[in-house]
Amino acid sequence: MGGMAGSWIERADRVLMPTYGRRPVTFVRGAGCRLWDDAGKRYLDLAAGIGCCCLGHGDARLAAAIGEQAARLIQVSNLYYSEPMVAVAEGLCTHSFGERVFFCNSGAEANEGAIKLARKRSRDQFGPGRFRVLGFRQSFHGRTLATLSATGQAKVWKGFEPLVEGFDFADYGDLASVEQALTDAHCAILVEPIQGEGGIVVPPAGFLAGLRRLCDERDLTLIFDCVQCGMGRTGKLFAHQHEGVRPDVMTVAKGLGGGVPIGAIVATEAAGTVLTPGSHASTFGGNPLVCAAARVVLDALTEGGVIANAAARSTQFFAGLAAIQGRVAGVEAVRGRGLMIGVALDAPVAPILDRLRAAGVIALAAGERVLRLLPPLVISAAEVEEGLAAIEQALRQR
């Protein structure tokens, strides 16, 4: 494709829907934790494609697996079996509470499917009338109409009303608020073990266990949205493993494919047998190409020392950020777990992101005043120090 005049940015602005506030950078290649733009400028990547590129860019194992699988078989549909899909499902079950897996293409799709599963599970067992899902304020679960409705942030609802009926919200981290909000019409609780888009918020110890207790007492399905906080991001394969709590259903995506689009619903046997032929499906879900990538990712995370590196670099990051907080005004809190890090500021984060980008560092926001860091899990100690120095400099320039 070609023949259109102008820069890639100008061409994009003519043909793409304006759904993103894109920064004026066109990336053309990556290696490890580095990115290069079309002008040859090098960047340190502390965003990892919004937490997707857990093995960094250009990982040789991942590239080889994708290339080999593409030459062999890309897509056959879920009307048939394929080896890579089975291998990844087995891996997810081996390394989690799960016993059944459904594959899709994104986190939003996984959450949409989990909501359907919870509603059908309740209807099969208790009949109609018990369909509501309790979520949390400041949560984020996706951009489909149902997952948007399940998201506890009014700003994402604007323009899409009426929302899907059946979603209520409690205060994150507050079990008393949950108990007050629950009614006989609820079938499930949907929660991020660590809130991502809501500001990188870790709940109090015992909160997830309390949700498990409430779900057991009321026969509710407990759904953990691990789309952002899963796949080694927090220093364990899944964030809830820090608390030793088992959900009925878990959704994963982002890092699962190392950068290629794949999502999954992981469930217990009891929950995972609710969706039967004709009740749910995905044309591309779990195709051989993306599962070849996910197989490499799972192997690297469970056998390759990547999660151990993430834990070590997390300690380094948090120590460095705490030191910066003590030296630089305007840092209100440093929070998160593993390499899912939020730096809460007393002013908007957008100018900080602009200064970092100008200095050759890519980072993210989580809300208006939180600097979000989601680097590749393979980041080195030297790269962490480089990132810390750039963050301090950007904060001092305010």
Image (cartoon, rainbow, N blue to C red):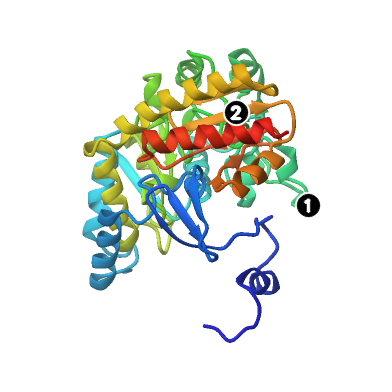
What x and y, as percent, mark residue 329? Answer: 69, 21
Crowd tier of the residue under label 1, counting other residues whose Cα lies within 10 Å: few below 14, some 14–19, many 20 or above: few
The residue tagged 2 is 343
| Image-based side of 218 in relation to 246, left or right | right
Q: Front-most of 207 and 315?
A: 315
| Image-based side of 87 in relation to 206, left or right | left
Up the image or down, 336 lies above or below 365; here it is above
Mark 1 or mark 2, which has the lower sequence index? Answer: 1
What x and y, as percent, mark residue 366? Answer: 62, 37
Helix, strand or loop at label 1? It is: loop
Q: Amino acid at mark 2?
A: Val
Front: mark 1 or 2: 2
Identity of the residue drawn at 47% across and 44% down: 51
Q: Amino acid at mark 1?
A: Gly
Identity of the residue drawn at 41% across and 47% down: 33
Helix, strand or loop at label 2? It is: strand
Identity of the residue drawn at 74% across and 39% down: 154
Q: Is residue 192 visible?
A: yes
Residue farthest bottom in this picture: 3
| Image-based side of 382 in relation to 62, left or right | right
Q: Front-most of 324 and 295?
A: 324
What x and y, as percent, mark residue 292? Answer: 28, 57
- Image quarter of residue 138: top right
| The C terminus, quarter of image | top right
Q: Front-most of 21 and 194?
A: 21
Up the image or down, 232 lies above or below 54; here it is above
The residue tagged 1 is 159
What x and y, as percent, mark residue 219? Answer: 47, 24
Q: Front-most of 190 and 328?
A: 328
Callouts 1 and 2 close, C-beta under 8 Å: no
